[in-house]
C-alpha cells in the first residue's frame, strides 16, 4: 500500500491515459486485482479530473495527501465488495 501511495503522487505530472496507466500499474504491483484497481481508479475519477489532474488540484488547492487518502478509501471500498479478488 505504501508503494501505491508513491504512485499516486507521480500522477500529478502525467497525462490522463498515462496517469491512469501509472495508477493501475502501481495498484496491481501492490497485489490488487485488475478489476479492483480499475474500480478504484474509476471511483477517484468521479471526484478528480484525471485528464488534467495537476491543474484540477492547483485550481482547487487540494493537497496530494487528500488524493492519496481518497484513492485508498476507494480501493478499500472496491476490495470489500463481493467478488473482489486480492492477490
Image (spheres, rainbow, N blue to C red):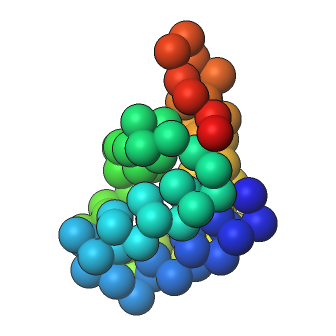
Could you say which is closer to the camera, residue 43 or residue 81? 81
Q: Position of residue 14 (x, y in %)?
A: 34, 83
| Snapshot quadrant of residue 56 | bottom left
| Snapshot quadrant of residue 34 | top left
Q: Is residue 83 visible?
A: yes
Q: Residue at x 77, y 66 (%)?
A: 2
**Does 64 sit left or right of 83 as displayed?**
right
Q: How many marks?
A: 0
- Vertical side of 69 occupied by 35: above or below: above
- Vertical side of 38 occupied by 86: above or below: above
Could you say which is closer to the camera, residue 55 or residue 8? 8
- Vertical side of 78 occupied by 6: above or below: below
Q: Is residue 62 visible?
A: no
Q: Position of residue 78 (x, y in %)?
A: 54, 30
**Does 22 sit left or right of 15 as displayed?**
right
Q: Residue at x 58, y 45 (%)?
A: 32
Quadrant in the picture for the C terminus: top right
Could you say which is closer to the camera, residue 25 or residue 66? 25
Amino acid at each position: 500500500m505504501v508503494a501505491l501511495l508513491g504512485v499516486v503522487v507521480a500522477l500529478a505530472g502525467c497525462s490522463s491515459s498515462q496517469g491512469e496507466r501509472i495508477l493501475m500499474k502501481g495498484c496491481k504491483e501492490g497485489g490488487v486485482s485488475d478489476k479492483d484497481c480499475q474500480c478504484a481508479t474509476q471511483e477517484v475519477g468521479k471526484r478528480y479530473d484525471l485528464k488534467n489532474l495537476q491543474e484540477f488540484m492547483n485550481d482547487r488547492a487540494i493537497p496530494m495527501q487528500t488524493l492519496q487518502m481518497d484513492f485508498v478509501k476507494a480501493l478499500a471500498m472496491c476490495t470489500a465488495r463481493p467478488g473482489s479478488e486480492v492477490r
